[in-house]
Amino acid sequence: GYGRVKPDVVTYGTAIRGSNMKGSCRYLTGTSVSSPVVTGAVTLLIEIMKKNERLSRLLSPASIKQIIMASADKLQGVNMYEQGSGKMNLLKAYELIQGYVPQITISPNKIDWTDCPYMWPVCSQPIYHTAMPITVNMTVTNGMGVSGAVVSPPTWHPNTQTNGQFLEVSLSYASILWPWSGYLAVTISVSRMAQNWAGTAEGYILLTVQSPATSEDISDQTSTLHIPIKVNIIPTPARAKRILWDHFHSIGYPVGPFPRDNLQIHNSPLDWNGDHIHTNFNGIYKYLRSKGYFVEILTTHFLCFDAENYGALFVVDSEDVFFESELEKIEEDVNMKGLNLVVFGDWYNGPLIKHIKFYDENTKQLVVLQGGGANVPALNKLLAPWGVVLGDKVWRGKLDVGPHVLDFASGTSILAFPEGGHVLSGALWDEALGMIHSKELLVSSVPVFGVYHGGNGSVAVHGDSSCLDEAGQTAKCYWFVEEILKMVNNKHTTIADENLVPWQPVSYRGPKLASTPAFHQYSRVIMYVDGFQQFRTLPSCPVHEAVQTRDFNDTYPIAQLSNKLLAVDARPVDYILLNETEDEDNMRLFYVLGIITFIGVACVCAFLYFMYSLFHRKRSILVHVRTRRRV
C-alpha cells in the first residue's frame, strides 16, 4: 500500500523574510520556515487551553494535533500527500477549541476515490475484479489519553442500497494505541459478483477505542468512528489493456548509494528518491491511462500474481536481483500463458561504478556506489531463457524511429538476441570511455532495443529508462512505450517497423560484475551470512481476509460522515481572551514596566549626553589655552 498521509497540514513557507548571520534580512523557503509558523500557532493554542479550567485538563499532543488538522482549509487541486488536511487556519482552530471534547480521529477522515485529485493516486484509476488489492494506511489519533485500546475488531458495513456488497474489505490495525496514536490499514478489492458491473459502491467502517481513566474524577472514556468508503467500480478490462508494473525489484525510499540513471546530471549524482510509478514515473503512468491502459503495481515477488490477468509485465530500471523461483515462473508465464515481458534497463559498468565517488559533507564519508543505473547482471538472468544478453558499456545519443527521435541517455546495449528477433540500432557515443579516460568514441551501429515474438508471449527489451524517468528526463519517449505495447500485444505493423532489422549474431564478451560489497543491505532478495551471499527466505504472498460484515440497507448519511472532521461540544463557551481579568492585570503590569523602562533609558541617555558635552567643553578650553601660549 501507500504510506500514511504526510504532511498533516501546510502553511506559509515560500519567500518568507527572515534574518541572516550578517544582521540583514533574507528570504527563506521550505519546511524550515513553515515549521516555526506551526509551532507559533500551537503555542497560542496551548496558552488558550491553559487559561480555561475545562480545557486545561484536555491539553495533550493529540488534542492539539486534532484541532490543528480539523480546522485546516482544504486546498483545491492538490492531493492529500501534498497538503494533508489542508492549510492551517488559526482563527478556525481558536473557534474549534472552545467546544473540544476528547475523542479519536483518523487521517484521512474518509476513503472516497471519487474525490479527485485530493485522494490521488488511488482515485486516478477505478478498481475492478482481479485487480491488485489497494491498501490505504490511516493514522488514528487518540485525544482521550496517552494510551487506548480497540474495544472489539473493527467491522465493515456495506450499504446494500449503494452496492457496498460488491466490495471486499480487510483491515489491519494497532490493537493498542500508544503514545496518543495508532494505525488502521484498509485493503479494498472487488468481489467476483461485480466482474461485469459498473457503478459506485459505498459503506463504512466502525472503529471503537477506549482509554483508561486519567484521574479519580474521570471514568474510562470511549469514542467511536464511522469511516466512510466510496469507490468507483468498472467491469474487468480486457487483458491486453492491463499492465503490471514491478515495484518489488526497485530499491525503495530511502535509498542507499545508487547513482542517477542519466549520467549527464552532475548536480545530483545519486538517485535520492528511489523509483515509483506515482513519483518519478508519474508521467508515463498518466500517459498510459490517457490511452486507455490500466496500470497496477506489484509490490511483492513474481509468484504472487496470476499472469493470465495481464497483457504485459513491466520491469523498469530494476536494481535488485530475482529469486530463482521467480525466474522459473516468468519463463512459464511468457512461453505458456501468453504474458508479454517488457524490460527497460539502464547503464551498468564496473570500472565506472568504481570511478564515481564523492565526499558526503553530512556523514563526512566517501560515498561508494553499490550498483549502476540498473542491475544488468540480474536482468540477464531474467532474460536468459530467450538468449538475451545486455552489455556493460554506457551509451548516449539519439536514434531515428519513424517520424520521432528517441533520446538515449546513459543506457546499455544488446549483446545477444534470439534468432527471429528484430532490433533497433543507431550511432552512439561511448560515455564510460569519456568519463573515465576523457576520450570520445562514436560507434556507428549499436543495438539498444529488440523485440522477439516466441511461444505464446513476446519479449521486448530497451537499454535505457531515462526517457521515462522525470527525475533525469531530457526528452520524453512515452510514444515509444505505446508502440512497444502495440508490438507485443497485437504483433502488427508500427511506426518503428521500418527501423527494425533482423538480429545478426555477433561474438561478444559478457558484462563483468562490479564490486558492490554493501549491496545486500538494500536488497529484498539477498543477504550475507558468515561472509557468504545467499538468498533470503521467499516472503509469503499477502492474504487479505475480509473482515466481519454487517449489511445495512437504510439511507445512512454517508455524505454527512465524510464532512465530520472533529466532534465538538455544542454548548456555547465564552471567548476567554476577552473576559480574563488575569489578562487585564498582566496588560497593566506590562504598561507600567514599559513606562519605567522608558524613563530609565531616557535618564541614562541624558546623563551620557551631559558627560559628553562636559568633556567636549573642557577639551575646547584646553586647546584654546595652548594656542595662545604658542602665539
Image: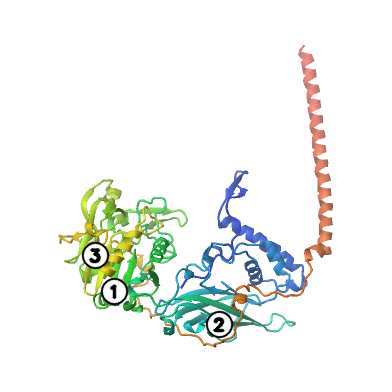
- Residue 175: mark in rendering: 2
What's the distance in space between the residues labelled 2 and 3, CA to CA? Answer: 52 Å
**Marks 2 & 3, CB-CB < 8 Å contact:** no
In the rendered image, the residue lying farthest to the top is 631
What's the distance in space between the residues labelled 1 and 2, CA to CA? Answer: 42 Å
Report which quarter residue 316 is drawn in: bottom left
Q: From this viewpoint, is residue 469 visible?
A: yes
x, y (%) of residue 283? 41, 60
**Marks 1 & 2, CB-CB < 8 Å contact:** no
The answer to whether 463 appears left or right of 625 in the picture is left
Name the N-terminal-most of marks 1 and 3: 1
Name the N-terminal-most of marks 2 and 3: 2
Please name the amino acid that badge 3 sits on. Answer: Val
Please name the amino acid that badge 1 sits on. Answer: Leu
Name the N-terminal-most of marks 1 and 2: 2
User: 137 or 278, which lies in front?
Assistant: 278
Per the image, label 2 sits on a secondary structure element best described as: loop
Residue position marked by numbered label 1 in the rendering: 339
Residue position marked by numbered label 3 in the rendering: 451
x, y (%) of residue 24? 62, 43
Report which quarter residue 327 is drawn in: bottom left
Colour approach in the figure? rainbow
Please name the amino acid that badge 2 sits on. Answer: Ser
What's the distance in space between the residues labelled 1 and 3, CA to CA? Answer: 14 Å
Residue at image location 52% in from the left, 69% down from the top: 119
x, y (%) of residue 41? 67, 61
Query: Height in image: 365 above or below 454?
Result: above
Q: Quadrant of the C terminus?
A: top right
